[in-house]
Image (cartoon, rainbow, N blue to C red):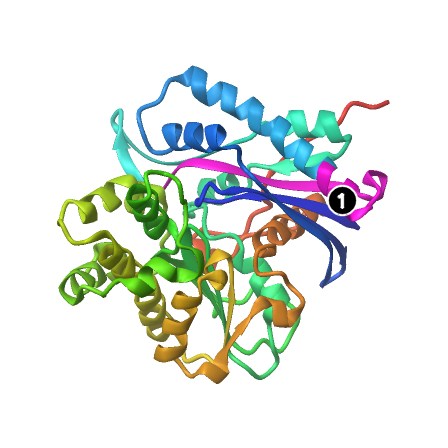
Amino acid sequence: MRVVGIMSGTSLDGIDVAIVDVRGKRVTPVAFRSIPYPSNVRAALLGVSNTMAHTAAISRLNFLLGELYAEAVLETCKRARVPLGSIELCGMHGQTIYHEGDAADFLGRRVASTLQIGEAAVVAERTGLRVISNFREADMAAGGKGAPLVPFVDALLFQHARLTRVAVNIGGIANITAIPPLRRADPYIEEVIAFDTGPGNMVIDALVAHMTGGEQTFDKNGRIARSGKVHQGLLESMMDDKYVCALPPKTTGRERFGQEFAAGLIATGIALPDLIATATAFTVDSIVYQIFRSTEPDEIIVSGGGVHNRWMMRRFREQLDPETIKTSAEFGIDPDAKEAIAFAVLAHESARGRCGNLPSATGARHAAVLGKSSLPQLS
């Protein structure tokens, strides 16, 4: 089956579209394209993410994103010369504007909740594809945290008969999947450990935007971090963060490591290049610490936007055996495309009526079939 996956992550940098062929347990990438959000759309999304917001803004953005997602699929097909008619299914993650995996007191009850926007019915109407969306809710209904979900696909893509592998994704938030040697092609193994480690690029991006007045939204190649000096006292304090120290299952996002966290760093008065250097060190050190608290890897496979931050990757190699560090590109998976590929695969599983979560990663009481289906109109 040929499936298209749409992903827009916590970095709010744009829309990733991956087209893959899924045959049994085999996933073959066909095409990938990343389309940046227009600056005003990105600003609007920041304005409704983990903040007080008008319901009109959320509703309008929900439908606008549906249009942008559909346009991104059509543009990817056009650029890659992949006939839209060859695609049978679409998996769409949507844009997370709020995620609270741990239940909080609300109106006399304990409630965990999540909200991804991007109207799937619009995508189905514009593309003529069946769209599977809203993947997180079924896991949360089963008592899970709704994240991370990509580990199911990590296990599928990277499992090995003899080697223990850790898949590391560094997007806005960083997460790891520890995959022990799997002697059968089945990702439903209790020994798979997966969770968000804390911030990936999110804090760095916020500091860079503040430093440059919004002219830059990320630290290209880690140049600013390289020019700064890590503040050891602040780094030690950050490593004592309650979330970093917590045991899995756990998930986090902009609610903990967003603008308020960055503002707290800025309020220290430490020079911004030094803050960016320290935030970069925090991303790496928190990942490394939590990898070795979870397993002893033979190989570490890195994906996500952090792969392009040379200074960040250098720090990884300084702390780990460089021979163990690889990127997902060495396994035929574009580091920027992995999460879009993941939601294409998860949609494929859902369409087949198969479960797509790993209870060992999310804390759910049982495996669940994920997602809600939006059907195109019959022509």
Point 50% across, 37% down: residue: 95
37, above or below 325, in the image: above
Bounds of the magenta segment: 75-102
Residue 177 visible within the image: yes
Q: Position of residue 155 (x, y in %)?
A: 57, 65
Q: Position of residue 9 (x, y in %)?
A: 49, 45
Between 213 and 267, the one lying in front of the other is 213
103, above or below 274, in the image: above
- Residue 69 appears in which quarter of the rendering? top right
Residue marked by disc 1: 79
Between 260 and 137, the one lying in front of the other is 260
Q: Amino acid at mark 1?
A: Arg
Neighbour class for label 1 at 10 Å: few (<14), some, many (≥20)?
few
Q: Secondary structure at mark 1?
A: helix
Residue 375 visible within the image: no
Point 24% across, 45% down: residue: 261
